[in-house]
Image: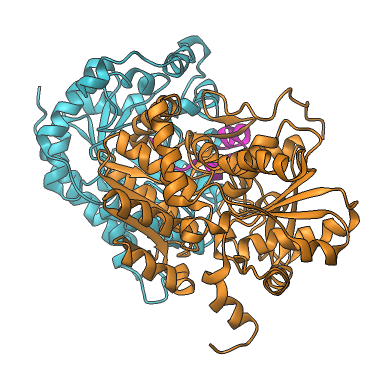
Chain colours: A orange, B cyan
Amino acid sequence: MTVERPNTFASGPDEFGHFGIFGGRFVAETLMPLILEVERAFNEAREDPEFLRELDVYSRTYVGRPSPLYFAERITEELGGAKVYFKRDELNHTGAHKINNTLGQILLARRMGKTRIIAETGAGQHGVATATVCARFNLPCVVYMGRTDMERQSANVFRMKLLGAEVVPVDSGTATLKDAMNEAIRDWVANVENTFYIIGTVAGPHPYPYMVREFQSVIGQEVRWQMQEAEGRLPDSLVACIGGGSNALGLFHPFLDDAEVDIYGVEAAGHGIESGEHAASLNGGRPGVLHGNRTYLLQTGDGQILDAYSISAGLDYPGIGPEHAWLHESGRVTYLSASDQEALDAFQWCTRKEGIIPALEPAHALAVVRKLAPELPRDHLMVMNMCGRGDKDVATVAKRLGVEL
Amino acid sequence: MSERATQPRTAADLAIQERQVPERERGADSGRIRARFDRLKAEGRGGLVTFVTAGDPDFETGAELLAGLPDAGADLIELGIPFSDPMADGPAIQQGSLRALRAGMTLRRTLDLVAGFRERDGDTPVVLMGYYNPIYAYGVERFLADAQAAGVDGLIIVDLPPEEDVELCIPALKAGVNFIRLATPTTDDNRLPAVLTNTSGFVYYVSIAGITGTRAAADQQVAEAVERLRRHTDLPVAVGFGIRTPEQAAKIAEIADAAVVGSALVETVAANLNADGTPKTGCARAVLDQVRALADGVRGAVKQA
């Protein structure tokens, strides 16, 4: 590829929300004035010390930040190569990185005077994180979730209901995450005056990919000083799983201009990319336009969107954040993949070795750590984002292992 | 609204207006849309625009339906490009799109449908309505050439706001294909100039903030909105979303230059299917009868000054 190497990888997007050719604002006119308003409000908020103070207080006292950087000693010993650290974002309130973003967005929604919150969810983690902050800030919350996903993640559905959210089953299309997002957009168009849409990942129309990245970047910013404290220097490599890609970008973004740091994103290969049943948009898709942005998509030759497949409902999306598409084409980040089986093996391995039950999403990242680390020297510092805890996946894993609960 | 009106335009808004494609750079279009609105004006009435999804429930029925629309009284035809993820559409049109896709429709076959129609009708304007991804996948330049060859007069692409004009709008205007923009209740006076920049053929006013086929706007609100649009543009104004009955269509045709009816027709397609999704005998005829009733309504309406 003959992509010119830019001076910086961290300055995007431009004023139209583009990362190279990716991103943009491909939405119906009804939403445009609101999207411009969200952009304006976000840009003001991030310069406002009062907003930043509020965000910081809740991050520390409600979410539990900073999350620890943990040296995974037994895994490191077994792999016999790189020194492996976990960024423990699974210890956040609600058990995943998702709340970093929902907290930021709900504070913005309040600032904008919005009185109703909507969200889409796949695995239910973002839905739970949204319902949680809605309960805390006393705003009505409607979560759209594909009916197929509701069956796969019934515990999370109940959690959202306990938190006071209305969970709306989506039967349109194929009844999964992409359809939940379509339905949330339809709701937004019809309730544009009072409603704020909390998108769960670094996708959607500008400013969402940028805004969500900014709220998640706290992950990478903490890793910078935590690794200084632990080892007196920056890490040598970063690894994170990718569905839409918000946990990954949160870890990666503060390191994009540190050329000596190798960065690996891990897509879900499902039954294998060659099988056609996967969620690897970069490794198995091509550029297209969906949900407000141009990015890599799983699609037919005619531009019809295909269903993604992964054992992990959180990675099961036929697109990927536009900034990842750009980082892929510019070569700054290397995108690999891990299959269902590899993730399942890593899930059990981590649980027994470190006493940490990872979510199936970061289990994909761990599967790649398992391949990369043995080939690297012992002084190589590798950080993997443990972006979610695996309690929600216990039933899925039991079923796959043929265990009756 | 008043608060927003006092805010200065952003640099991005100004950048959009600077992209205006001057008349001399626009390709010659088919002239069918202009001729049709001129004729409606001469007849002193508003027009009926009908929307159906291309190839719903299958190619043959779609072709039969399309061929019958002008005689049934459709003044302009909007033809939906089937898409797997129609984000601005309600359940009726979503289902229509999925039926067409299951029956094997593609963008190429949508163009074939138009080409077949054009063999027998050289006057009725055909506007394709849909989402950008199928066109992007097809390739913009190739699509514009093929659409023109097939006899397409204009495009309404829901997810291409003025911010994304370089994608398709500007190439379309240069090629001589009209690009019809949607204005909505959220498009305030500040934004309207950006929306009308590079709009051609007519302006489609979406009468509600919402998706297709749900609720209807009050006539008074529509009248005020059309009035406001006319202060900003000389293009004809068509109004759609939520118009279902001959009475509603008649009322809108008095206020605006044309009334668009879509979901109600697509629901009639759905009501005339067998359990296996194949069309019942007379499926197209049922829709055409409904179009006739709507056209009678529109033709009976008296144009307001």
Q: Identify which residue is drawn at 56% across, 24% down.
A: A14
Q: Using the image as rendered, state which of residue B186 and residue B30 is in the foreground.
A: B186
Horizontal and vertical percent position of residue B101:
50, 59
Q: Using the image as rendered, state which of residue B247 and residue B189 is in the foreground.
A: B189
Q: Is residue B274 magenta?
A: no
Horizontal and vertical percent position of residue A133:
36, 51
Q: Using the image as rendered, state which of residue B245 and residue A28 is in the foreground.
A: A28
What is the quadrant of the N terminus of chain B in the image? top left
What is the quadrant of the C terminus of chain B in the image? top left
Q: How many marks on residues?
A: 0
Magenta: main secondary structure: helix
| Quadrant of residue B295 within the rendered picture | top left
Horizontal and vertical percent position of residue A401:
65, 83
> In the displayed image of the protein, which residue is found farthest to the bottom?
A404
Q: Identify which residue is drawn at 63% across, 59% down.
A: A279
B176 w.r.t. A92: above or below = above
Q: Identify which residue is drawn at 10% across, 39% down.
A: B300
* Magenta region, residue range: B125-146
Q: Identify which residue is drawn at 67% across, 64% down.
A: A363
Horizontal and vertical percent position of residue B130:
44, 43
| Quadrant of residue A337 within the rendered picture | bottom right
Q: Is residue B140 magenta?
A: yes
Q: Using the image as rendered, state which of residue A300 and residue B176 is in the foreground.
A: A300
Image-based side of A334 in relation to A94, left or right: right
Image-based side of A263 in relation to B283, left or right: right
